[in-house]
Amino acid sequence: MRELIDATPINQEEYMAFSLFDSKGTPIENQRYTWRDMVRTPLSKLDDDAFTRVRVIMMNGIEIEALRFSHMAARFNKELRLPLALIRRSEQHQATMINWLLSADHSPLEITIAYEQVAIELTAAVAQREPDPYLAQTYRYGLLEDFDHIYRYSALLDRLEGKDPNNITQSYTDIVPARPTWEHHRHPGDDPVNHYDRTNAHMLSKMHALTITSTEQQTHNYYMNVGPTFSDPVARQLYAEIASVEEQHVTQYESMLDPSETWLEQWVLHEANECYNYYSCVESETNPRIKAIWERFLDYEIGHFHTACEAFKIHERRDPAEIITGAFERPIELKSQRDFYRQVLIEEVDLRRLGPDFVPKAQESQASIDYRAMLHSDGEPSGPISAGYIWTPGTELMSRGAASGATIATRTEAAAQVPANGIAQ
């Protein structure tokens, strides 16, 4: 099994290194909002570039993770409650401004397609830059599961709404089957992976783990909330099935984090990661109106970062440079990663899990095989809902006969040919 596909970034464009210590940012007392400021004109579903929506969804996930962490830290650290509360309120309003950029003409299923596009393109970008080969393998493994999810949801979108998912993905992301969703379900003992060592892990490894954990947690929360709103019984089952996989993904990715990191160390890392992600958005955003938001919030987050650093110095008597060890040399590559994940699909679709290890399909954990047999004992939805589905431009506007010759799939959908009772073996 190869350990790393390619550690060289695809985009060879030169970037100016970005150091969190070069600016103090906007002080928290100067971070001001109004309701009109927070609730702005939303994106255009069809006219804005799909990667603008990718950035919006990604940054909402990052901000929601910051809020979640801040609340948990406040419950265990009395002396941090006031500074956390001050920053948390600003981040609440940042999250509001960002999430409210999604327009109301997106259906829940279209937002779902967009969430999976974020998972695919962001995870693929992170996997290529991850300096730790084992963690890079973990990202590639999860990537193929999100890749299959967008295919299953696309079939559902065609079935329920007669819409082409490419209206959302804009040809940046392939819509083809990968590791079949019904094979994603694992025994809980096979989900955690080995964590990085906080004392010697590369700073980027820590940023990547927080980034992907944040976006996967957001996806899980969304599916749990929107799934019950569907009236179609198979749609309700599909959301239930994939929400379960997303919980597994959160378990997998959060287990990368070193549990020996202190609360203050985690706070500094969270603030640094927010800065890293906003910096990545600033560098790649094509919509000037949205880019101005990323620039403003990057400046705000630098202010939050320095507040966390001061608390770190006071309470732990440690230098933040111990964990933020240098400048960010490059942003996350927020663009189509098609060539990369097509290669991963060819080479790694048959990998499975045995505890924290990635193994050939024949060596998969028996505990996971038995767990799936129980879970699928009266059928499973992800296979039947997409049986015979081949994405092609126009969906209901084209006949199945004409569409059958238009697929760009790199693998056949033999895996979707499940028995009539819907039980995948």
Image (tube, helix red, strand yellow):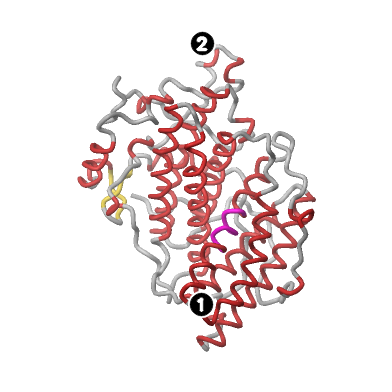
Residues rendered magenta in the picture? 60-66
Q: Amino acid at mark 2?
A: Gly
Query: What number of labels is visible?
Result: 2
Classify 10 Å Cα crowding around label 1: few (below 14), some (14-19), many (20 and above). some
- At a point 61% along the width and 33% down the height, the residue shown is 107
Secondary element type, mark 1: helix
Prevailing secondary structure of the magenta residues: helix
Of marks 1 and 2, which one's residue comes earlier in the chain? 1
Q: Is residue 162 above or below residue 45?
A: above
Residue labelled with disc 2: 401
Which mark is nearer the camera, 1 or 2?
A: 1
- At a point 52% along the width and 41% down the height, the residue shown is 116
Q: Is residue 172 magenta?
A: no
Q: Amino acid at mark 1?
A: Leu
Spot occupied by residue 221 in the image (x, y as percentages of width and height):
49, 49
Classify 10 Å Cα crowding around label 2: few (below 14), some (14-19), many (20 and above). few
Spot occupied by residue 110 in the image (x, y as percentages of width and height):
59, 34
Residue labelled with disc 1: 264
Disc 1 and disc 2 in contact, CB within 8 angstroms: no
* Left or right position of 57 against 235: right
